[in-house]
Image: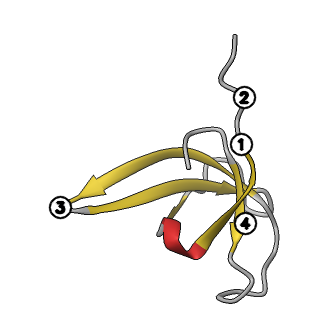
């Protein structure tokens, strides 16, 4: 997953199926975490998520 992708929680792990947008990421040691702006959260209230708990809804278009 990359910045701009739309994601939601894996339905096997969480019943909340509101989508969110990947806004950034951080790497700590060997783990990668995604910064996600969930559409039902206030603007700028960014979650730090494990990508293994998420599924891709729509891939960002990288063409210009």
In the figure, 2 relative to 63: above or below? below
Q: Residues within 10 Å of mark 2 (few under 14, many from 20)?
A: few
The answer to whether 57 appears left or right of 49 in the picture is right
At x 67%, y 66%, the residue is 55
Q: Nearer the viewer, residue 16 or 12?
A: 12
Q: How crowded is mark 1: few (under 14 residues within 10 Å), some or many (20 or more)?
A: few
The answer to whether 26 appears left or right of 37 in the picture is left
Structural distance between the alpha carbons of marks 2 and 4: 18 Å
Please report contact status of discs 1 and 2: CB closer than 8 Å, yes or no.
yes
Question: Could you say which disc has been placed on residue 8 in the image?
Answer: 4
Say which residue label 3 marks.
29
Rendered location of residue 45, percent (x, y):
60, 56
Residue at disc 2, secondary structure: loop
Say which residue label 2 marks.
61
In the figure, 56 relative to 50: above or below? above
Label 1 or label 4, whichever comes before in sequence order: 4
Structural distance between the alpha carbons of marks 4 and 3: 25 Å
Label 4 or label 3, whichever comes before in sequence order: 4
Rendered location of residue 4, percent (x, y):
65, 38
At x 70%, y 86%, the residue is 14
The answer to whether 51 appears left or right of 58 in the picture is left
Structural distance between the alpha carbons of marks 1 and 2: 6 Å
Quarter of the image for the C terminus: give it. top right
């Amino acid at each position: 997953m990359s910045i701009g992708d739309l994601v939601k929680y894996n339905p096997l792990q969480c019943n909340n199926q509101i989508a969110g947008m990947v806004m950034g990421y951080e790497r700590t040691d060997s783990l990668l975490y995604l910064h996600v702006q969930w559409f039902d959260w206030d603007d700028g209230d960014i979650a730090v998520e494990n990508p293994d708990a998420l599924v891709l809804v729509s891939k960002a278009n990288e063409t210009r």
